[in-house]
Image: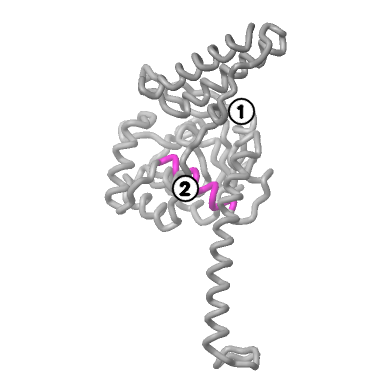
């Protein structure tokens, strides 16, 4: 294949990708499509079927995802208070355990051990495009995990199990008022209503998972510990949360620095103690 042909193929492929957004395709899908095309042609290059990989558009396979917001501890509790009581524990577990929607809805009573203070994630409920639901294992082996429950919400979960969950070891932890497994589209209505009631804007339910992971990172947990808690098989996500935690710690340190400087200017005390204190 001549270099001129390669350039034409590259332009053709790039042109097709440029037209995808106009057809309503999202930027993430476009980037993944280009990455797949480049991988296929890379294999062809390795097999000596082509002389050069024509996919040379810099950054075309990079997915730029905006950073999602996280809720404060007060906002998590405000949402838990604003939602229907049968979903209060779901809000708290999403916000402080960092579990996904499908993982929460897939919990059975036997997965929750309040004596040990743990939740075992063994399955997830996925909603298919045709409206049917599928119970399946987590996306990766790391997704099957045991997550420790913060002691502050153990009693909240116990109250939920006593009041709203199905009986028996195989009873579902979260069910609707009529005994059905909650559907995401219906819960979204309750979510938006709770957000309005709590005065919170721009927050998605999945952002509660980000909240839980960010809080976990702020405790100083290691990358490996965060990976285990979040259910990730690679360090990429854990490093993102650790980076966010480090940025926040820098802001705290800068604020402390300002307080120290203000205190040094204001006291003029050379004895090393603030006025009215003793060593």
The structure residue drawn at horizontal position 40% and vertical position 19%, both measured from the top left corner, is 19
- Decide which of 113, 35 is in the foreground and name it: 35
Q: Name the residue that disc number 2 marks.
A: 95
Answer with left or right where residue 278 lies relative to residue 97: right
Q: Name the residue that disc number 1 marks.
A: 140
User: Which residue is most to the front?
Assistant: 4
Say above or below: 203 vs 5: below
Say above or below: 10 vs 184: above
Say above or below: 35 vs 119: above
- Give the SS element for disc 1: loop
Q: Quadrant of residue 274?
A: bottom right
Query: Residue 18 in the image: x percent, y percent?
Result: 43, 22
Mark 2 and mark 1 lie on one chain; the one further toward the N terminus is: 2
The structure residue drawn at horizontal position 65% and vertical position 39%, both measured from the top left corner, is 235
Answer with left or right where residue 167 lies relative to residue 238: left
Q: Residues within 10 Å of mark 2 (few under 14, many from 20)?
A: many
The structure residue drawn at horizontal position 61% and vertical position 14%, both measured from the top left corner, is 40
Q: Quadrant of the N terminus?
A: top right
Answer with left or right where residue 146 lies relative to residue 86: right
Magenta residues, start to end:
205-217
């Amino acid at each position: 294949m001549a270099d001129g042909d390669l350039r034409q193929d590259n332009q053709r492929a790039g042109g097709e990708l440029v037209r995808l957004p106009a057809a309503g395709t999202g930027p993430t899908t476009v980037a993944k499509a280009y990455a797949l095309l480049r991988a296929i042609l890379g294999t062809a290059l390795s097999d000596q079927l082509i002389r050069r990989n024509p996919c040379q558009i810099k950054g075309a396979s990079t997915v730029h995802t905006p950073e999602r917001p996280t809720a404060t501890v007060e906002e998590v509790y405000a949402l838990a208070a604003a939602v229907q009581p049968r979903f209060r524990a779901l809000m708290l577990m999403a916000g402080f355990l960092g579990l996904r929607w499908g993982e929460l809805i897939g919990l059975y009573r036997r997965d929750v051990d309040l004596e040990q203070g743990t939740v075992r994630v063994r399955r997830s409920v996925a909603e298919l495009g045709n409206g049917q639901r599928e119970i399946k294992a987590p996306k990766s082996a790391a997704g099957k995990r045991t997550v420790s429950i913060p002691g502050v919400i153990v009693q909240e979960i116990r109250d939920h199990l006593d009041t709203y969950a199905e009986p028996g070891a195989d009873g579902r932890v979260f069910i609707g008022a009529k005994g059905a497994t909650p559907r995401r589209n219906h819960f979204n209505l309750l979510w938006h209503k709770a957000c309005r009631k709590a005065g919170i804007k721009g927050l998605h339910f999945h952002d509660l998972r980000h909240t839980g992971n960010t809080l976990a990172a702020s405790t100083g947990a290691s990358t490996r510990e965060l990976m285990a808690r979040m259910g990730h098989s690679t360090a990429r996500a854990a490093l993102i949360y650790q980076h966010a935690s480090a940025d926040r710690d820098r802001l705290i340190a800068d604020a402390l620095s300002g307080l120290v400087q203000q205190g040094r200017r204001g006291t003029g005390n050379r004895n090393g103690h603030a006025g009215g204190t003793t060593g």
